[in-house]
């Protein structure tokens, strides 16, 4: 079993338009503080029909391979995690394979379980490489989604769109995963779903938050049990969760990461050998500690606040945001990561930041990617949201980006910007 496996490099792609969240609040007659402070949002990506999950996935993957000089012959697996694919049968991954002219010798498939689908792909790739079955080959894992709840819904300010592509290999220069320490928790619940044929998700918003927190508790406790057994963390003067340099959460909206962190701390405080000496109220108060949230979580949320929910990609946007800002400072330190997908399935895992994380993130040019976006009015956002998704606007794609050009006889044609 190979132990040194994980993420070598990553790249992101976002739609070319975004709306300022305060503009949206004012247009909806809502106090902007509800969206900015209540939900933690700043901006929200707006995808037009030409920027579907294939176009975003192909753009992120092309950027990853180009910016890191990756020889496609290295690749033996391509998985796209998505819950907003474009066909009931043909996967987004095979479109990406064709658009990027990737080898025919790869294992190629999509992975779907709401926002958890990308993590399922990442784990399949990691364990494939760790087992030795990959025989030195690498995997391309892409998370690509468009989060849509519709105009004037409670979920509207938590929409977003984008993709994160990751190269998984035996040279984990960004993040070496702790193979085998994962904790999982899944339940059959109706918290968020999208019936066949519908463009917008159906969601029981407040219940979905409860499901997320319950699943987190199970997944974290599973990871902690293994991490304690392997002496990666220990009960001592600090809690096991406090021994992780940073903790990254699935981020449907930024405030959710704060709620998640409180819940994780509560798990530790309730289970600590010293728990009997404190009251439930005192533990709740300690769990809510702002200093712990500021130290372990806040710095990972920069990209999520500016893009919104990207379903499968949200956790990996947090990883990109964190390592973009702190890649050098965190070198050699351990991160915890919590993936959650409604329905529901969650997994807590961990990894150690590589010593070339800062250089790898510089190649991702995340600031440049965001700076090339255009801020649009709420009126323009509403127009884009109502465009029929079979007829993309005839806009030329930006250099290096892909766009859906047309759908003819149920076949989709994409173009790449020169
Ligand atoms: P809502 O009911 O409109 O909002 O929808 P609210 O009344 O709960 O208010 C939100 C927060 O703003 C509250 O803070 C308020 O106090 C605060 P909290 O008590 O939660 O800390 N607030 C204010 N703050 C400052 N100034 C003010 C003000 N007014 C209120 N004036 C909800 C919120 C999240 C439910 C909604 O946006 C929604 O349904 N979103 C979509 C579902 C979702 O994101 N669920 C998250 C967990 S499930 C998940 O993560 C999976 C998912 O990504 C899908 C997948 O897996 O594929 C969604």
Image (spheres, rainbow, N blue to C red):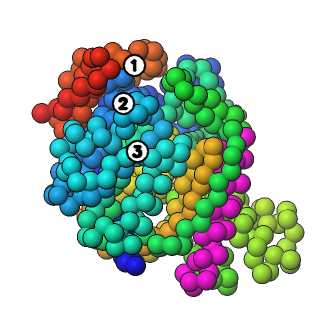
Whether pointer 3 and pointer 1 mark residues with C-beta atoms closer than 8 Å, the reply is no
Q: Main secondary structure of the magenta part?
A: helix
Is disc 1 placed on a helix, strand or loop? Answer: loop
In this image, 193 relative to 133: left or right? Answer: right
Mark 3 → mark 1, Cα distance in angstroms: 21 Å
Whether pointer 1 and pointer 2 mark residues with C-beta atoms closer than 8 Å, the reply is yes
Whether pointer 2 and pointer 3 mark residues with C-beta atoms closer than 8 Å, the reply is no
Sequence-first tag of 1 and 2:
2
* Residue behind mark 2: 52
Answer yes or no: is residue 161 visible.
no
Sequence-first tag of 2 and 3:
2
Residue that appears at 73% across and 40% down:
207
Looking at the figure, which quarter contains the N terminus? bottom left
| Residue stretch rendered in magenta on the structure | 207-232
* Residue behind mark 1: 389
Instruction: Assess whether residue 215 is covered by the magenta stretch.
Output: yes
Mark 2 → mark 3, Cα distance in angstroms: 15 Å
Q: Count neighbours of disc 3 (C-alpha within 10 A) and say few if under 14, some if 14 to 19, many if 20 or more.
A: many
């Amino acid at each position: 079993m190979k132990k040194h496996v994980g993420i070598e490099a990553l790249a992101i792609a976002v739609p070319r338009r975004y709306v300022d969240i305060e503009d949206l609040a004012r247009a909806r007659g809502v106090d902007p503080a509800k969206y900015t402070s209540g939900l933690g949002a700043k901006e929200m990506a707006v995808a037009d029909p030409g920027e579907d999950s294939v176009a975003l996935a192909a753009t992120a993957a092309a950027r990853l391979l180009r910016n890191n000089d990756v020889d496609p012959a290295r690749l033996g697996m391509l998985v796209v995690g998505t819950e907003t694919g474009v066909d009931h049968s043909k996967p987004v991954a095979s479109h990406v394979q064709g658009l990027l002219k990737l080898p025919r010798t790869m294992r190629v498939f999509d992975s779907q379980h709401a926002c958890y689908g990308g993590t399922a792909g990442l784990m399949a790739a990691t364990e494939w490489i760790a087992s030795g079955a990959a025989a030195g080959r690498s995997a391309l894992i892409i998370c690509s989604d468009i989060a849509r709840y519709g105009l004037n819904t409670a979920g509207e300010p938590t929409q977003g769109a984008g993709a994160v592509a990751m190269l998984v290999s035996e040279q984990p220069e960004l993040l070496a995963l702790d193979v085998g320490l994962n904790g999982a928790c899944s339940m059959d619940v109706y918290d968020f779903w999208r019936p066949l044929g519908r463009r917008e998700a159906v969601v029981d918003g407040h219940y979905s938050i409860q499901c997320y927190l319950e699943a987190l508790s199970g997944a974290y406790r599973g990871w902690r049990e293994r991490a304690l057994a392997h002496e990666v963390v220990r009960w001592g003067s600090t809690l096991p969760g406090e021994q992780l340099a940073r903790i990254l959460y699935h981020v449907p909206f930024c405030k959710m990461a704060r709620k998640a962190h409180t819940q994780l701390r509560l798990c530790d405080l309730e289970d600590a050998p010293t728990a009997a000496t404190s009251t439930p109220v005192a533990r709740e108060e300690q769990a809510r500690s702002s200093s712990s949230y500021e130290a372990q979580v806040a710095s990972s949320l920069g990209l999520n606040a500016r893009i919104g929910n990207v379903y499968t990609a949200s956790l990996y946007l947090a990883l990109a945001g964190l390592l973009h800002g702190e890649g050098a400072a965190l070198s050699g330190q351990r991160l915890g990561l919590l993936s959650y997908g409604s329905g529901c399935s969650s997994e807590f895992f961990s990894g150690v930041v590589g010593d070339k994380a800062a250089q790898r993130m510089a190649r991702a040019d995340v600031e440049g990617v965001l700076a090339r976006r255009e801020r649009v009015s709420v009126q323009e956002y509403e127009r884009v949201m109502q465009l029929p998704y079979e007829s993309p606007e005839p806009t030329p794609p930006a250099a290096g980006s892909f766009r859906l050009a047309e759908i003819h006889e149920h076949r989709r044609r994409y173009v790449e910007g020169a």
